[in-house]
Amino acid sequence: MGGNTGARIARATDDSARGFDRAGELSLHAIYETFSRASPVNMATAGAMRYLLDAAPSADRPALRPGGDWDPPVPPAALPDSPNAQLLEDNGRDVLYLFIVNMGGTTFVPGLYRLLVHWPAYVAHVAIELQPLFIRPNIVDACRKIVDL
């Protein structure tokens, strides 16, 4: 995970300390469902698009193919708005900055974490729980393989 602003982040001990109510829990489920569904699809689609961009047309794969019928799946519940970091309270910004990543010299906070910052106490708890996982060699290796695809 990314840059720490020096904020002291405490582990939540129960659901109320995590800072979400039933509506927040439903929003969290919608966020996770959306990202669980969309991320693999986006990765596969980006890989296929890169292949199509780099591959020359052939007899087996003409430049354009007529599309078939496709019914998209039912979309998950609506997601909350992505908050503007400047409008967040200090604790929201501190938690958000825990998730800064650097890709090719450009730093940003991925969309998942920008959506989750509506619940700073919950995100702080998740950051504490996830941090040990992100230093495990098998997880680091798996992430590198995904990035290298």
Image: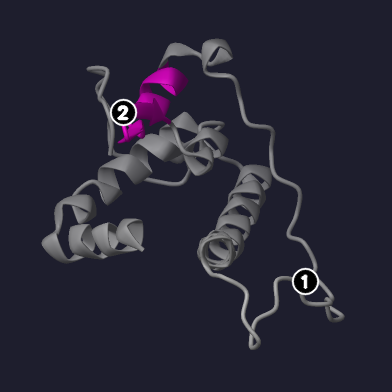
Going from N to C along the chain, the mark reached first, 2 or 1, is 1
Amino acid carrying mark 1 in the image: Pro
Q: How many marks?
A: 2
The picture quadrant where one finds residue 74 is bottom right
The front one of 85 and 51 is 51
Q: Is residue 36 visible?
A: yes
**Is there CB contact under 8 Å for labels 2 and 1?**
no
Magenta highlight on residue 52: no
Q: Position of residue 46 (x, y in %)?
A: 55, 59
Q: What kind of element bears circle 1?
A: loop
Question: Which quadrant does the C terminus fall into?
Answer: bottom left
Q: Is residue 106 above or below residue 60?
A: above
The residue carrying mark 2 is 105
Q: Position of residue 93 (x, y in %)?
A: 43, 19
Residue 98 appears left or right of 61: left
Point 77% across, 71% down: residue:
73
Residue 95 visible in the picture: no
- Image position, residue 75 (x, y; %): 77, 61
Q: Secondary structure at mark 2?
A: loop
Q: Amino acid at mark 2?
A: Gly
- Residue at (58% x, 66% y) in the render: 52
Q: Which residue is mark 1?
A: 73
Q: Up-down: is 46 above or below 16?
A: below
Residues at marks 2 and 1, CA–CA distance in whole angstroms: 36 Å
Colour scheme employed for the rendering of this structure: one colour
User: Against 129, is 6 above or below?
Assistant: above
Say left or right for 56 vs 12.
Answer: right
**Residue 96 colored in magenta in the image:** yes
